[in-house]
Image (spheres, rainbow, N blue to C red):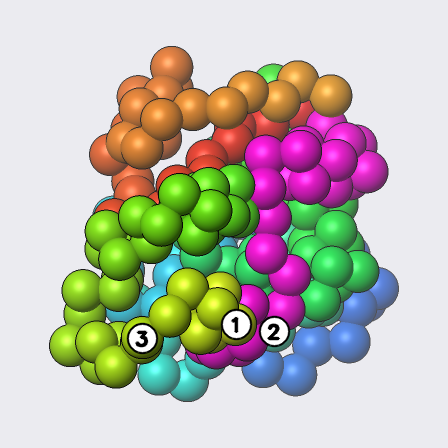
Amino acid sequence: MQNFQAWLKRLGESIFKKREVSSFARESFDKIMSEHGVPYKLHLGCGKVRLEGWINVDGDTKATAADVRWDLTTPLPFPKNTCALIYHEHLLEHLPVKEGVSLLKECYHLLQPDGVLRVAMPSLDELIERAYKGTWREMDWISWPEHRFIKTRAEMVNIAFRWWGHQWLYDREELHRRLEEAGFSKIKDVAWGQSDVPELRDRETRKDTGLICEARK
């Protein structure tokens, strides 16, 4: 235990010396790393969804499930090559593409060799296909009471691109492209709730999550 605590102290000093830290206190870092150890699991953009046994991270003050408050457009305060698994759902599309790729690169650097990133989000492929076929009213989010005012597919498409802080929607080709830009080469499309990694199964909480990839370092 003494060796681990000494390692934590050196680790914290190294990280915080290199990075300007405002919203993430040194005490919080020590506490979280002591509780989870290495390797740990990161849940980014957690919002109100808490994954037990994971470090839940979000920059929104309304994110009640967060263990760590952190601006995800800046480098995360964790050491490289120490994370086993990273998961985020409906996060990447809220970032401009440049910042989105930066976050994916950060995930790549944090993961241990053979670590896995699982990315889940709405599917632009599905949006376009349903708009073309005229089945767009069958999408789950269209049935929500606050969206029943939508009358046409053009209105639906514009809302999908512009509302909720959406910055960049992805189809399968685009997500693979950006993961490759971040350094990943082992990329696999997976189904909702399914994974070869037991700890990544049944993680999706949104019915409108239609695009899911796992990228292994």
SS at mark 3 in the image: loop
Image vertical order of residue 77 relative to residue 172, above or below: below
Q: Residues within 10 Å of mark 2 (few under 14, many from 20)?
A: some
Mark 3 vs mark 2: in front: 3
Magenta part of the chain: 161-184
Vertical side of 39 occupied by 144: above or below: below
Q: Are marks 3 and 2 in contact (CB under 8 Å)?
A: no
The residue identified by callout 3 is 151
* Quadrant showing the C terminus: top right
**Residue 13 lies in magenta, yes or no?**
no
State which quadrant residue 50 falls in: bottom left
From the top left corner, tell me how far across and down residue 29 is, in percent: 53, 63
Left or right: 19 in relation to 87: right
Three-letter residue code for mark 3:
Lys
Alpha carbon distance from label 2 to label 1: 27 Å
**Residue topped by disc 2:** 71
Question: What is the CA distance from the residue labelled 3 to the residue labelled 2?
Answer: 36 Å
20 or 174, which lies in front? 174
Counting residues from the start of the chain, the first of labels 1 and 3 encountered is 3
Q: Secondary structure at mark 1?
A: helix
Q: Residue at x 43, y 24 (%)?
A: 190
Q: Name the residue rendered at 79%, 60% in the picture.
A: 98
Disc on the earlier residue, 2 or 1:
2
Q: Secondary structure at mark 2?
A: loop
Q: Residues within 10 Å of mark 3 (few under 14, many from 20)?
A: few
